[in-house]
Image (spheres, rainbow, N blue to C red):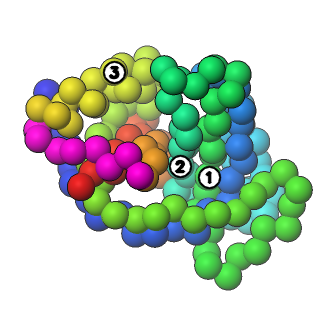
Amino acid sequence: MMDIMIEKMPAYRIAYIRQIGPYGIQNVQTMEELKEWAKLNHLFNDESIIFGIAQDNPETTRPEDCRYDICIVVSNDYSVIDDYVREGNIVGGKYAVFKIHHTAEAVQQAWIDIFPELLRQRYQLDESRPIIERYMVQMVNNHYCEICLPIY
């Protein structure tokens, strides 16, 4: 059984880099690029929140067409002036949050386990909002991250 915490996530303003191609090692490299960009722009610190958002289901989208956005939360008045980094918003709402070990194996296994667990606990996935991998710096420093599933 997995631990689920239900949370009302606020809306966030984000800066992000989109990676297109098979999910996996390239996502990790893109995350490092975003962190470097954030450090150069004085946006990365112990309070930073980074999101990974898989925009496509690899079961229904060809691997070479899968989109993965690596995001960092920025203030509402921050203006991204960059050809490589885009800006956007994350809609808030009710989420089922799964805390997992921050290893490739644990994250892969979690993606297999979270959907049956959500059903078992009688929550319904809201497919109008994206599933979010959340990496809070202080949590990552302790080798954890979270997968947040939008629910009704």
At mark 1, the secondary structure is strand
Of the residues under marks 2 and 3, which one precedes in the sequence? 2
Badge 3 amino acid: Ile
- Mark pair 2, 1: CA separation: 5 Å
- Mark pair 2, 3: CA separation: 19 Å
Residue ID for mark 3: 112
Residue at x 21% of width, y 27% of height: 116
Tell me: 47 left or right of 35.
Answer: left
Position of residue 120 measured from the top left corner of the image (x, y, whole percent): 11, 32
Q: Give the dominant element type of the magenta stretch: helix, strand or loop.
A: loop
Where is 104 relative to 39, above or below?
above
The stretch in magenta equals 121-128
| The residue positioned farthest toward the bottom in the image shown | 77
- Whether pointer 2 and pointer 1 mark residues with C-beta atoms closer than 8 Å, the reply is yes
Residue at x 86% of width, y 61% of height: 82
Position of residue 54 measured from the top left corner of the image (x, y, whole percent): 54, 38
Tell me: 40 left or right of 31.
Answer: right
Where is 100 relative to 38, above or below?
above
Residue 106 shows in this picture: no
